[in-house]
Image (spheres, rainbow, N blue to C red):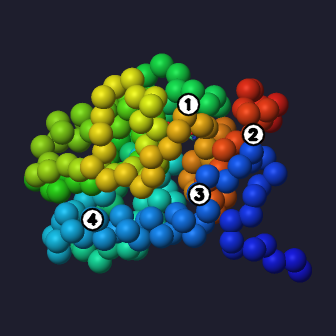
Amino acid sequence: MPTRSKTSKEHPDLESVMFTEAQIKKRVRELGRELRAAYGQGEFTIVSIINGAVMFTADLMREIDNPVRLDCIRISSYADRTKSVGTPQIVHSLTIDIAKRHVLLIDDILDTGKTITLVAGLIAKLRPASMKTCVLLDKQGRREVPFEADFVGFKIPDRFVVGYGLDFAERYRNLPCIGVLNPKLQNPPEWA
Ligand code: IMP
Ligand code: MG
């Protein structure tokens, strides 16, 4: 049976690879160190914005040995397009109590800033002891709502990327690398 290489091979639908699996792993490890420097040995509560932040959250959590609690929040914004449409909506909210807790909000990518601003606002209303934000990717040039994350994996240019949790119409989340989706496949896909 042919075995699929675990190293980041280019997927045929990618125009280029932006970050290889090894580069992501290295940066996530460094982010773990940055989190340990910020939180010491203390407990914190991770709020992960799903589905996009699933891989990043899972890997980052395993780089820290602090006691952590986890909850996920589901937000919809993109539908099957590559540009955010309208206002993001909360599809499924938090299920654990975060009052007086130190909260680390994690998302895959900070783009216009609308999603993280919405979730950060919701968390703030629940009176956490503190809130910090961590994103794997930051498309700084696309911001519509001013927002700076406390921890950023990589700053990237304005290209639509997929892989390592990031999707286009729910596809490509399982790619081990992050790559630029071939623009020919972006608008609108026949299979979406
Ligand atoms: P924002 O609300 O515009 O900041 O968008 C944040 C959300 O849009 C992220 O959680 C992603 O799900 C999605 N997103 C933004 N840019 C990309 C991209 O290049 N590829 C895949 N998803 C993206
Ligand atoms: Mg998302």
Q: Earlier in the sequence, mark 3 or mark 1?
A: 3
Q: Residue 136 location in percent, x, y?
A: 44, 53
Q: Earlier in the sequence, mark 3 or mark 4?
A: 3
Indicate left or right for 191 with 68 as reference: right
Q: State the residue position of label 4.
A: 35
Frontmost of labels 3 and 1 is 3
- Amino acid at pointer 4: Leu
Q: Residues within 10 Å of mark 2 (few under 14, many from 20)?
A: some
Q: State the residue position of label 3.
A: 19
| Residue pictured at 35% horizontal, 41% vertical | 93
Q: Residue 161 location in percent, x, y?
A: 61, 43
Frontmost of labels 1 and 2 is 2
Q: Classify the position of the N terminus by image quarter.
A: bottom right
Dot 4 falls on a residue whose secondary structure is: helix
Determine the CA span between mark 4 and mark 2: 34 Å
Q: Residue 160 location in percent, x, y?
A: 61, 38
Q: State the residue position of label 1.
A: 78
Q: Are marks 3 and 1 in contact (CB under 8 Å)?
A: no
- Amino acid at pointer 1: Tyr
Determine the CA span between mark 3 and mark 2: 15 Å
Q: Earlier in the sequence, mark 4 or mark 1?
A: 4
- Amino acid at pointer 3: Phe
Q: How many marks?
A: 4
Q: Earlier in the sequence, mark 3 or mark 2?
A: 3
